[in-house]
Image: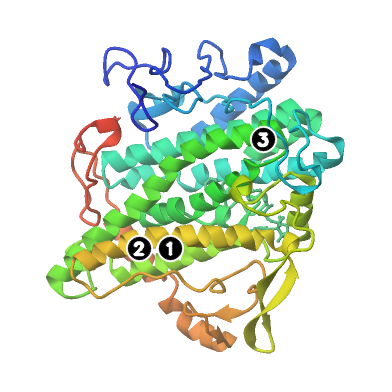
Amino acid sequence: MAATAGRGEIAGAGADQGEIVGTAPAPDGPVSVIDYTERIPNNVGLATDRRLQRALQAWQPKFHHWWASLGPSVPTRDVYLRTAIAVGRDGWANFARVPMEQYRWGIFLSERNPDRTVGFGQHLGEPAWQEVPGEYRADLRRLLVVQGDTEPASVEQQRHLGMTAPSLYDMRNLFQVNVEEGRHLWAMVYLLHAYFGRDGRDEAEQLLQRNSGDPDKPRILGAFNEQTTDWLSFFMFTYFTDRDGKYQLGTLKESGFDPLARTCEFMLREEAHHMFVGTTGVRRTVERTAALLARHGTDDLWGHGGIPLAVIQRYLNFQFSVSLDLFGSETSSNVASYYTAGLKGRWMETRRKDDHLLAGATREIPVVTGGAITTRTVPMLTALNLDLRDEYVADCERGLRRWNRELEQAGLPHRLTLPHEGFNRKVGAFAGHWVSPSGELLAAADWARRSADWLPSTEDRAGVAALMRPHYEPGEFASWIAPPGVGINDLPVEYDYVRF
Ligand code: BYC
């Protein structure tokens, strides 16, 4: 029987001596096995393209240098990590203890469907492109660069979190997320090198030269220059910001440019773990807070080793609002031309029951005019950023329901809520306006007076920081977070997932 993602087998003599070798666990779907004998593991036949191979091999030491200087800062002996060994539907993950610096980052594309056609826009029904159409070269390169830029940015933002991990289990999950973001960078760099010649190689260099928060060479998108100050921000980041990644990758997976679609399809499988880390990380934090709140009858939980629910809500407000900015403006001529050209589709494009052209379609978008939030009708094509954002918000609500169940089960009346879409926005219709979490349009002075109730304050961050003490004994967990129900890959929660 096939292993499924997240339950892959450990090659070698067991969890302790396992190494990343061997074939995929017997799959029941078609697989394409990744070649780990190559210096750059890949399933794209790199060995047959000497020029490309040489170019990527020249980039590889720069990547390793970047990882060593801006990747995880805690020194470890090895970490229990999963690595992709096959890209088919089943049996793609292999778990083993790996010294982090020896992690095998590689290039993995989902299998090619030779019958695939462009699913939307003016090229609807034409065979999917195996090369970059000349007229779309600049737009495609831009999409790859923006996507690629976020991946190393998040590793940089999370660099020091290992120092204060609430458990070895959580530390391992952090490192798993980090190595996979590193691999996603490889995914974009491969496409840049393989399909964009010299420009692509230059862009690949730049991806390592911009750095999160750097005043001179910042990362491209706003949220990736914010600091991930502590583990609560990390869980909120993996819940809200990685989820933007899931939705953006979902639209690029529909691309008419087939190598991009196949790349994103495989990235999305890895992304599922990042969603898991965010959903369960926040859930376990809320679980502990709910238990303490019920026991002590007060939300002033600092002295009891927990994070007040009001602080969790403020962290949530912040991360949700900066993640909404990542969708761009509600009306965008960029998104209209990406769609019409067949470069970037909608979420679940192929399942939508319309003409996939959207020429005459319209929709309402929010606008702020005359001191009020109203709507205006615009061509659907220009509103596709909002279409995607709506899908994202609906998904965010689902996680929130799970967190609120923890409060319900503890017999508490409190509930977490998503703030209004206009709250704390820097991009789009609400930028430059002051909107409360409940959607009230405020004067600047009112905002200045009240925003400390809605966004994490310096004191909140200091209180959370004071709780961030490392817990490096197997099975030990920090006071502010409940342990998970199960361990990784069926191992016990007490397993020593990271060794020093
Ligand atoms: N910050 O026409 P507009 C992930 C720029 S996360 C700064 O409304 P458009 C991950 C915009 O570039 C997913 N600038 O925007 C998560 C444009 O500039 P130009 C990353 C911004 O183009 C966690 C101008 O403002 N992938 O994978 O329709 C961990 C006008 O904007 C921002 C992608 O985003 C901002 N927030 O949409 C690891 C997919 N927003 O062209 C990884 C690729 C907008 O005038 N990117 N601007 O110079 C895209 O599809 C689009 O570029 C965007 C923006 C959705 C980002």
| Disc marking residue 401 | 2
* Residue 22 screen position, x and y as percent: 41, 12
CB of mark 3 near ligand 1 (< 8 Å): no
* Quarter assignment of residue 6: top left
Q: Is label 2 within 8 A of ligand 1 (CB to nearest ligand atom)?
A: no
Could you say which is closer to the camera, residue 69 or residue 245? 245
Q: Secondary structure at mark 2?
A: helix
Q: Which mark is residue 397?
A: 1
- Label 1 to label 3: alpha-carbon separation: 29 Å
In the picture shown, does residue 69 fall above or below 308? Answer: above
Amino acid type at mark 3: Leu
Q: Earlier in the sequence, mark 1 or mark 3?
A: 3
Q: CA distance from mark 3 to mark 2?
A: 34 Å
Question: Residue 73, percent across and down?
Answer: 42, 38
Q: What residue is drawn where x is 40% and y is 37%?
A: 175
* Label of residue 127 in the image: none
| Number of other residues with Cα within 10 Å of mark 1, as a class: few under 14, some 14 to 19, many 20 or more | few
